[in-house]
Image (tube, rainbow, N blue to C red):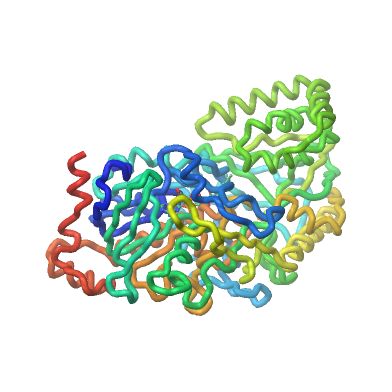
Amino acid sequence: MILDIADLADGQELSADLCIVGAGAAGIALALKLMNRGLDVLVVESGGRRHEDDVQDLYAGSVADPTLHAPTDRFRCSQLGGSTTLWGGRCVPFDAIDFEKRSYVAHSGWPITLDELLPYYREANRLCEAGAFAYQIDEAFGRPMKPMIAGFESSAFSTDCIERFSKPSNFAERYGPELEAARNVRVLLHATATQFSSDDSGRTLSRLTLRSLRGRSVTVRARAFVLAAGGLEVARLLLANRTLHPDGIGNQHGVVGRYYMCHIAGTIGRIKIDRPTSAVWHDYDVADDGTYCRRRFALLSEAQRQHRIGNFVARLHHPQIGDPAHRTAALSLVFLGSRLLPWEYRIRVAGSDGASLGHYAHHFTNVMLDPQSAVRFAYRMVTGRFLARRKIPSLVVKTKANLFSLDFHAEQVPNPESRIGLGNETDALGIPRIHVDWRYSPQDVATVAKSVELLASDLKSSGAGTLSYDPGTIEAEMTRYGAYGGHHVGTARMGDDPRSSVVDRNCRVHGVDNLYIASAATFPTSSQANPTLTIVALTLRLAEHLQGKLQLTRSSSDKKAVISEIGIGGRDSASFGAENLLSKQLAQH
Ligand SMILES: Cc1cc2nc3c(=O)[nH]c(=O)nc-3n(C[C@H](O)[C@H](O)[C@H](O)COP(=O)(O)OP(=O)(O)OC[C@H]3O[C@@H](n4cnc5c(N)ncnc54)[C@H](O)[C@@H]3O)c2cc1C
């Protein structure tokens, strides 16, 4: 059932077994997994069914260096479905090495391994609608595949691993009907979680105040709470709530908000492949189930260890779109049409907004000089992207001269000085706004510099081609657009030691018996991989854990036992859950 807080009476108290804060990828995945499992689940969501300026403004905050990080209300969406209403759908699991404690990466090491996540990854792939969990070409395709570059050999890179693409599925559109029909899951829109309170002022949260921008306020009593509010907002909520600790919930050791990572990404160099165009394949492959997949250069774990650098992948890419010197009609058409794209995509496609008239004229000339290519490209764009249900992730443009640039996406290593804090201003609900101080480190520069150097060397030694670039520009290129947008990682990291982490291996906040986090905020390291598939996998794992913890038993004595097991003391256990105010309320709808 999906309801709006406006449907409830002001001051009303609701109750549920589990309250999930946020209905994005994580919140919706958790609710789906707990559907029909006997628990009474309430999902509270700040936004409504579509974008609203005043709700989105709750995300606004300040940034220490605006050249390094996008405004905080960009690259995330406050509405049902969260940022999946805007995401690109690239799905990639983390590699085994990402979970390891690496001597050369400070603060690395997860308390869980890839093997523990594998079963959940398979299910996550289904939820993200990215097809089978098969990320090597031999397992993804039941047929021989062309090599990415014929004759390219490398001891540092694999070209056999792929990334898969979601449709991209907007979780609100895709799973809204199921949530609407669910008997045990209720989604409450326009309900922003603001203040937690505790009955015993100790280790347990008992109530959460929800507020709307229209002045409605209701309270939720729940046996457990999950923050699924996105990697930035999770930290903000913990820091802004002083219920259990004066520095914020879970922040007794000052770790909340620290180790903030995005990814290091950029486009660099000029690659000339010395082979016929038919010997290069950098377009999408379509799996039997229709999923778009794409090959890339992936830095092998052994090479990472040998060179003491982070994880790294790169793709053969078209030349910089914004620079009309590429003289490619299709790329110029994209540049000219880029104003139609959401800001988050436009800035990477077209560079800054301030191009001169001459610049536009140059692109226009490119189109006029090769109108057939431009029309073909526009047709493919309309049919493959706008009209198709499973959208082609991007249109790969081939140049006759076998010329490319290198598009890379690299791990950012954890750095305690890169952090989320609270600013001095408050939002319309009186909550301190977020302040972002994102920082990269010399090791991040080294990861990109060494990886590009290795690739250039292997292209040359195998006779496949040349990668020319100016090593002095690495740092400028990897920060040209600042931190990679939309990937908000590490701000409530997972670990066994409460002095250096915020949640334990089950994503429970250290020192709090009934508060959990489902978000990239819990990732201790960032990998080369985009985060959503791993967010969903970890969330499904959390669902199983919560199911075990909160299993509803019908007899009140059993109920008492379960409640004491999860540490909720000082409550009238017989009346807990039996009087479900929300169920009663909603039954009338
Ligand atoms: C342009 C763009 C492209 C992207 N492309 C990719 C990609 O290709 N691959 C990939 O893996 N990832 C991608 N991402 C990232 C992806 O969208 C996120 O990783 C994912 O959506 C995070 O899921 P989440 O549930 O943690 O947070 P979100 O999806 O952000 O959802 C959080 C929800 O919590 C709600 N909320 C926040 N605070 C409160 C509160 N106090 N009370 C109640 N509700 C609250 C919000 O309104 C929101 O609906 C992209 C992101 C963007 C912006």
Q: In which quarter of the image is the N terminus?
A: top left
Q: Position of residue 276 (x, y in %)?
A: 82, 38
Residue shown at the point (24%, 63%) measured from the top left: 551
Name the side, left or right, on which 570 lies relative to 252: left
Q: Position of residue 184 (x, y in %)?
A: 25, 49
Q: Position of residue 518 (x, y in %)?
A: 44, 59
Nearest the viewer among 134 and 13 is 13
Name the side, left or right, on which 153 lies relative to 468: left
Residue shown at the point (20%, 70%) measured from the top left: 571
Q: Does residue 234 sit above or below 4 in this rendering?
A: below
Q: Quadrant of the C terminus?
A: top left
Q: Position of residue 245 (x, y in %)?
A: 42, 74
Quarter residue 262 falls in: bottom right
Nearest the viewer among 577 and 151 is 577
Quarter residue 379 falls in: top right
Would residue 313 be seen by someone viewing this image from the given angle? Answer: no
Quarter residue 222 falls in: bottom left
